[in-house]
Image (spheres, helix red, strand yellow):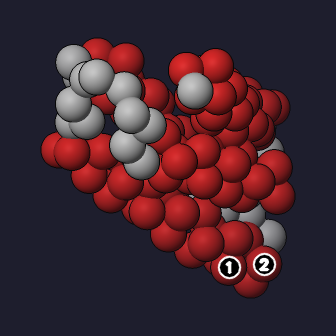
Amino acid sequence: MEFLRHLVVLVHLVGFALLFGAWAVEAFGGRRHITRLMNWGLAVAAVAGLALAAPWGTEGELNYAKIGVKLVILLVIGALLGIGSARQRKSGSAPSALFWSIGVLTLVNAGIAVLWT
């Protein structure tokens, strides 16, 4: 059972890497566009994160406050991706503040995962 949990953690990290990596490529490439890879990364991280939030029969207690905060941030990132995609279709590029908010919130979400004990 522990192996399966570690496998889900790996999938969750891959989802984060897809989201943040696609954002970083766009940010440092100078385009500042919302890509489908960002949406896929968010979806993979969300599904794996929800699976990790389920009780796995481990002896440790789940930190529901941490799970709740991370879920709210995930929903905000999803909303920003959706709004950015819609505005990008209309004007050709996502607003700069919205684009940078996605990257910052993604990094904050990873920081919460690592630093909140």
Quadrant, the C terminus? top left
Judge the density around disc 2: few (<14), some (14-19), many (≥20) Cα neighbours within 10 Å: few
Of residues 21 and 63, which is closer to you in this image? 63
Where is 28 relative to 115, above or below?
below
Tell me what residue is drawn at x 42 percent, y 48 percent.
54
Where is 50 relative to 26, above or below?
below
Residue denoted by label 2: 89
Tell me what residue is drawn at x 26 percent, y 23 percent.
60
- Name the amino acid, label 1: Ala
Where is 97 relative to 82, above or below?
above
Horizontal side of residue 30 vs 5, given as left or right:
right
Percent position (x, y) of residue 36? 82, 58
Residue 33 visible in this rendered orientation of the protein? no
- Name the amino acid, label 2: Arg
Percent position (x, y) of residue 111? 37, 23
Of residues 10 and 42, which is closer to you in this image? 10
